Structure formats: structure tokens, C-alpha cells
Amino acid sequence: VWCVCVGFNEKKGEISGIQCINVESGDKSIFDSDSVVFAVGAKALSLFTKNSPELAKHAEFREFANLRGTSVLATRIYLDRHVKTEFSANACWGFEEGVGMTMFDIRKLHGDNAQALVGAPGSVLEVDFYYANSMLVLDDESIVTKVKSHLDKICGDDCKQAKVIDAAIVRIPEGVNWYYPGSYSKMPSVKSGAYSNVFFAGDIVKTRHGSWSQEKAFVTGVEAANTILHRPNGSGIIPLSDDELHVSAGRN
């Protein structure tokens, strides 16, 4: 379903209607809106503004046109044997020029009974690449070959002896928020300054909680709900522990 804002009450400063379009059938439905939450990433928020003259009337939304995403390549390979890994999650660099990379051991992360491991005789390893435009254009076979080669270097002889028996590949063009110098000032707050009934949730949203990524998306979603329901801002949110000394020193 694709949703667009179609009702604007400028006197009240509200978005009053949302049109939902079924992308498969083309059927359209319009709903009155008490509150609207933009729970989207940077690229989508930018596109909303670029394709809506009404939203673009407001300086707040025009700033969102500067936000952008970076491309991600997500891969998961299934091996015919177990491969020893030291950590469940690993940040990597230097395997592809200018491309960031993380490697996850799915069995260590989720346990032997995880749905992703049903029928898997050996290790299931996920390798994700960030700022990966140059890799999205490769065919699946070439990607799997690259991933296996990188894992051989990371995991050593155990992995070199293992064979790939299955693989899954997902290409996400411009699908992950790109935090570049100066982007913070373009990011939305939980509550819109342009519309009284508009709110934002996601890891692109400014918050003083201190969380990041998926946790930040959850926290800002709760903060948006708290604001809509007139609850205390921290209701239902676990605060982070105090900064470590070196982080506190850096902030000051």
C-alpha cells in the first residue's frame, strides 16, 4: 500500500486526509486523519516533499529534500558445515573499496531453533554491505563468490573448506539513511513545526534519548505516541545508562 497526503487544512495547520493506494490493484481509499505519523526513512521523507507542493510550502519540509539514503546489499549464505566465529556481530572494512561491511553469525544471534536455521546443516552467515551502489549491479553468482571469498579471509580454514549450499540476496538502493556532515540540522523532530497533527518516527528523527538505529526507531515511535496521547515523553521508554567517561569528556 502506498499512502499520500490529500487533505490539508491550512487554517488549522493540519493534514486532514490520507489516500491509500493498493499498488497491485490500483484501488484507492481516502481516510480522515486525526494524527499523521511519518514513519519513514530519509529517502522517502525527501520524496514526499519533492512530490507534494503542499508540503513544500513549509520550510521544515523543504529541508527534508536535502536528506538522502545510501544503498545496501544484504546477503545470507548457507554452508554445508559449521564454521567457528569469534563474535556474533562484526564490523569490517577494507574488503571492497569505499564500502562498509558487517558480518553476522545467525546461529549465535538467534539460537539453533531460529526459523532462519530450519533445515540448515551448517553455519548461516549474513554479510551486509553499505554505500554499496557499485555492488548492486553485480549478478547474484558474482556476489556470492565475493561474499564467500571475504568470509574465507575472516574465518580462516574452517570457512575455506566449507561449501555454499544456498544463498539469499537483497538489493536495497538508497534504502538506508545517510548521515553526512550537516545532515542533523535537516532531520525532523518528533513533532512537526508545520502541522499540529503531524509527527515523525524512525532513526532519522532527532531525539535526546541517545539510542541508535532500530532502537532509536522504536524509541521515537513511542515518543510520537506519547505526544499524540498527551502522556509524559519518557513513558514506556527505558533511559540509557550514563555516558562512559571518555564519551562524557568528548561531549564536554
Image (tube, rainbow, N blue to C red):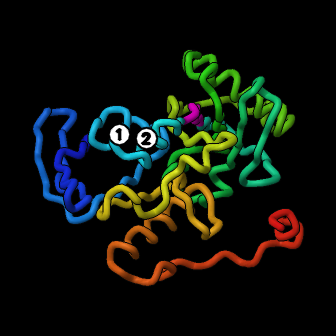
Which percent across, then down, holds residue 47? 39, 35
The kind of secondary structure element at disc 1 is helix
Amino acid under label 1?
Ala
Q: Nearer the viewer, residue 88 or 208?
A: 208
The vertical placement of 169 against 197, above or below, is: above
* Mark number displayed over residue 62: 2
Amino acid under label 2?
Arg
Q: Residues within 10 Å of mark 2 (few under 14, many from 20)?
A: some
The vertical placement of 247 against 178, above or below, is: below
At 46% from the left edge and 63% from the top edge, which residue is drawn? Answer: 190
The vertical placement of 116 against 128, above or below, is: below
* Mark number displayed over residue 14: none
Which percent across, then down, holds residue 223? 46, 71
Span colored in magenta: 69-75
Which percent across, then down, holds residue 61? 41, 45
Res 14 quadrant in image: bottom left
At 78% from the left edge and 35% from the top edge, which residue is drawn? Answer: 159
The vertical placement of 172 against 217, above or below, is: above
The kind of secondary structure element at disc 2 is helix
Q: Nearer the viewer, residue 27 or 86?
A: 27
Classify residue 146 as left or right of residue 94.
left
Q: Are the two marked residues, 1 and 2, in contact with CB atoms closer than 8 angstroms?
A: yes
Classify residue 107 as left or right of residue 12.
right
Which percent across, then down, holds residue 204? 53, 51
At 29% from the left edge and 58% from the top edge, which residue is drawn? Answer: 36
Instruction: Give the CA distance from mark 1 to mark 2.
Output: 5 Å
Classify residue 229 as left or right of residue 240.
left
Q: Does residue 122 appear in this view?
A: no
Quadrant holding the C terminus = bottom right
Residue identifier under label 1: 56
* Residue 32 on the magenta span: no
**Secondary structure predominantly adopted by residues drawn in magenta:** strand
